[in-house]
Image: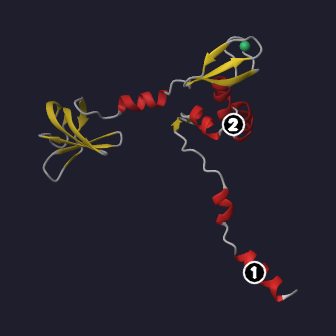
Amino acid sequence: MSDYDSLLDRAKEELPEPITQQERFQLPDLNIRKEGKTTVVRNFADVLDRLNRDPDEVVPRLLREMGAARLEGYVETYVLCSECGRPDTHLQKEGRTLVLQCDACGGHRPVRARKPTAETEQEADAVEEGEVYELKIEDTGRQGDGVAHKDKYTIFVEGAGKGQVVKAKINNISGTLAFGEMIEVVEG
Ligand SMILES: [Zn+2]
């Protein structure tokens, strides 16, 4: 082996990996939401758009990549015709709406991800400014406020004491901290 060849070999060995990574296509940001055990890509239609691929081409391959558990809901939403129940369908965009067009019976319907129940529940549980909540005061904050917890929020309630259950109105939310005032003492 010539010096040149061995140098070339070494150079190849030392070539940084990232070259292939740079060439790799950057996947559009997926707007993913977990719904219990299901993962839903909320901007699926937009992603398909940006992939510049016919959904017919993407979907079957995507399906193969996806776990069987997710398959059922996916197929129900994106594949099966709601008129005749057959999978002989294709997706097409009509304006901003993704439509499932059936090749078997001619039926068509807009594709809508199933109602995200987990999200709805989460919203119902979340703390919102201006709302009144019944809170169990678990602690006393440094400023002497009562401290309660709800979901991910730590809530400071002015005028409430440790051990009390109070109704408090939320005046301000900052990140996972919420600040409220006591409306009435329910217990304690
Ligand atoms: Zn059909």
The amino acid sitting under disc 1 is: Arg
10 Å crowding of disc 1: few (<14), some (14-19), many (20+): few
Q: Is residue 34 visible?
A: yes
Q: Is residue 112 above or below residue 127?
A: above
Q: Is residue 7 above or below residue 45?
A: below
What residue is disc 1 on?
Answer: 10
- Element type where label 1 sits in the image: helix
The earlier-in-sequence mark between 1 and 2 is 1
Q: Nearer the viewer, mark 1 or mark 2?
A: 2
10 Å crowding of disc 2: few (<14), some (14-19), many (20+): few
Alpha-carbon span between mark 1 and mark 2: 40 Å
Q: Quadrant of residue 160?
A: top left
Taking the image in four quarters, ligand 1 sits in the one at top right
Looking at the picture, how far across and down is residue 130, in whole percent?
22, 30
Q: Quadrant of residue 51?
A: top right
What residue is disc 2 on?
Answer: 53
Quarter of the image containing the N terminus? Answer: bottom right
Q: Tell me what residue is drawn at x 81 percent, y 85 percent.
A: 4
Look at the numbered disc 1 and say if its residue's Cβ is closer than 8 Å to ligand 1.
no
Mark identifier at residue 156: none
- Element type where label 2 sits in the image: loop
The amino acid sitting under disc 2 is: Arg
* Residue 56 relative to residue 127: left or right: right
Q: Tell me what residue is drawn at x 57 percent, y 34 percent.
A: 46
Q: Tell me what residue is drawn at x 78 percent, y 80 percent.
A: 8
Looking at the picture, how far across and down is residue 14, in whole percent?
70, 76
Nearest to the observer: residue 146 or residue 177: 177
Looking at the picture, how far across and down is residue 18, in whole percent?
64, 65
